[in-house]
Image (tube, rainbow, N blue to C red):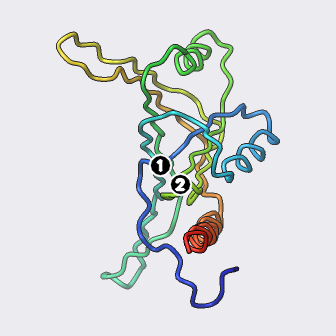
Amino acid sequence: MGLTAGTPLQTDPIFAYNFTITLIDTSSTWAVVKSIAFALAADIVLGGFTECTGLEMSMEVEEIKEGGLNGTLLKFPKAVKWSNITLKKGVGAGQSLWNWHYDFVEGKGKRRDGIIVLQNDLHIPSNIWYFRRGLPVRYTGPTLNAGQSNVAIEAIEISHEGIYQVPYVGYAAAAASFGISKAVTLSQR
């Protein structure tokens, strides 16, 4: 059964804890396309990060006073600025974040593109952000404290050359959600 006019779509906000992240070699356009395609598959896990911040962009505004109109201030868009993205994850056996950052220290680092996928409660992609040519500008190791039993967390801060949202993913997720919930409802009868 397909979507028809008047079919209710999920309008509740998506929980912020259902997300995956993948970092890919910038030199491979095919890898980006493949990663986005894999991200659209609900059962593919792309990353184990616990927190992602910095999905922000802002626009500078140029203000011009118009002659003869003392109360008017015209505003025009200028450059767009993107915030750095910070990714945090529990420290494991691997050293991939450290190695990526340290490769730049040694002069042999490679930029990476990134794909951040927010999923709905059925783990179907709801929103996908893509950032270009990520450059690790800060690595933060875990805070170690023998008096606490916290998980050791490492972080990487990534400067990039633009973040974009992949269009129409939310509509596909809503349609897939509707189809899955309908199938579950029908199979329970």
Is 17 left, or right, of 162 in this rendering? left
Say what secondary structure mark 2 lies in.
Answer: strand
Seen at 63% across and 90% down, the residue is 5
Under mark 1, the amino acid is Asn
Seen at 65% across and 64% down, the residue is 167
Give the class, few, some or many, for how many residues have Cα within 10 Å of label 1's Cα (few <14, many ≥20): some
Task: Kindly indicate whether the residue at mark 1 contacts the one at mark 2 (C-beta within 8 angstroms).
Answer: yes
Per the model, the C-alpha gap separating discs 2 and 1 is: 5 Å
> Residue 91 lies in what quarter of the image?
top left
Is 143 left, or right, of 168 in this rendering? left
Going by the picture, which residue comes out furthest to the bottom? 5
- In the image, 178 versus 167, the foreground residue is 178
Under mark 2, the amino acid is Gln
Query: Nearer the N terminus, badge 2 or badge 1?
Result: 1
- In the image, 23 versus 135, the foreground residue is 23
Give above or below for 120 relative to 150: below
Count of numbered labels shown in the rendering: 2
* Position of residue 133 measured from the top left corner of the image (x, y, whole percent): 65, 37
> Residue 51 lies in what quarter of the image?
top left
Seen at 69% across and 34% down, the residue is 24
Seen at 77% across and 47% down, the residue is 33
Q: Quadrant of the C terminus?
A: bottom right
Give above or below for 33 relative to 154: below
Please give the label number shown on residue 18.
Answer: 1
Give above or below for 77 relative to 41: below
